[in-house]
Image (cartoon, helix red, strand yellow):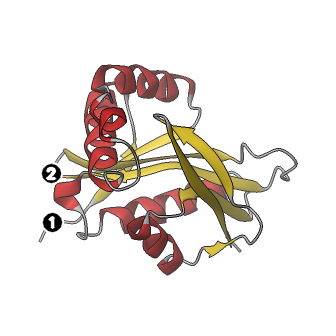
Amino acid sequence: MSVIQVRPATLRDAKAIAEIHVAASQDAYKALLPAAALDAMSVQKRQAFWREAIDLCEPQVIVAHLDNKIMGFAGFDRSRDKGTPATTGEVWAMFADPVHWDKGVGLALWDATRDGLQEEGCTKATLWCYLRNERALRFFELAGFKRELGSARTTEVGGARVEEIRLHRSLV
């Protein structure tokens, strides 16, 4: 039986990461965002973004793979939220290819992300999630995250107003 492996992303992974980012977003957010916004997502633009992130290590990017086929990715680093201590890390992004949902990709990515944040000296992890993204909320709550009461905010994505909430958990 093959086991999902996780490793740091390389520049060669940027296209696969972008393809997963677009496919997973289009599937996961179809009930949250306007179809036009989802249809306008560009693998080429996402690839440029992820190439730069990988090159600059901001955020740190990892990929989950099985037999060298990339199944998902995560980006993590220090929290971008103002006023957070230097010991607070943030999951900036975590996506699995929809064909690999519910197959352990998210868990493999979370385990590696948690380890990476701990290696960076983080004692707490946070992330932002769309309030109506039930799949992601369920996953992160099973991983020990709790919703931060009073953290809800509204952002505009593709012309739609979407509620987000911050989740947090201890890493110690």
Instruction: Determine whether, in the image, residue 144 is placed left or right of residue 72.
Output: right
Asked whether 136 or 4 is in front, the reply is: 136
Q: Amino acid at mark 2?
A: Asp
Dots 1, 2 in contact, CB < 8 A = yes
> Helix or strand or loop: what does disc 1 sit on?
loop
Indicate the position of residue 55 as horizontal and vertical percent values: 49, 23
Indicate the position of residue 125 as horizontal and vertical percent values: 67, 62
Instruction: Determine whether, in the image, residue 151 is placed left or right of residue 97.
Output: right
Quadrant where the N terminus sits is bottom left
- Tally the numbered discs: 2
Which residue, given by chain and number where applicable, does mark 1 sit on? 2
Alpha carbon distance from label 1 to label 2: 8 Å
Asked whether 167 or 103 is in front, the reply is: 167
Which residue is depicted at the point 54% across and 63% down?
A: 131
Packing grade of label 1 (10 A; few <14, some 14-19, many >=20) is few
Quadrant where the C terminus sits is bottom right
Q: Is residue 166 above or below residue 137?
A: above
Which mark sits nearer the N-terminus, 1 or 2? 1
Residue at the left extreme of this rendering: 1
Which residue is depicted at the point 71% across and 48% down?
A: 79
Indicate the position of residue 90 as horizontal and vertical percent values: 64, 52
